Amino acid sequence: MTQHKDMTQHNKKIIPLINLDVNQEGIIQALEGGAHFQNRLQALNIRIGKRIKKISKNPFRGPIVIEVDRSQVALGHGMAKKVMIEIEDKKS
């Protein structure tokens, strides 16, 4: 069962990419989709352990632009909600 609620681990939080703020960075911790989904993201160099930065988001569930290894990639809203990101908890 996929869980999209914020999960806290020590001083770090794991959230879906869609919940990342613009210009916020994090490390990919999980890709919550099937083999085709994971292969598609890996072809775009989006893999577990990679540091990414959210560049922009579009209104009305439009694509989300991220930066990974100095390249910008646009992901659809549905894909972005399946990419789980670890961020530093600012409250610690």
Image: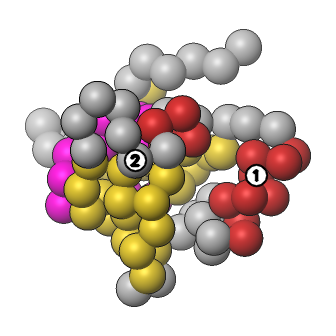
Picture quadrant of residue 47: bottom right
Of residues 18 and 61, the one nearer the viewer is 61
**Magenta span has 25?**
yes
x 54%, y 33%: residue: 78
Relative side of 47 to 87, left or right: right
At label 2, which amino acid type do we have?
Pro
Q: Tell me the distance, in whole angstroms, between the alpha carbons under discs 1 and 2.
A: 18 Å
Q: Mark 2 points at which residue?
A: 63
In the rendered image, which quarter contains the N terminus? top right
x 62%, y 45%: residue: 30
x 26%, y 63%: residue: 55
Q: Range of the magenta residues?
A: 14-27
Q: Mark 1 points at which residue?
A: 38
Residue 5 spot, x, y in % from top left: 43, 18
At label 1, which amino acid type do we have?
Gln
The disc placed on residue 76 is none
Of residues 53 and 57, the one nearer the viewer is 57
Relative side of 15 to 46, left or right: left
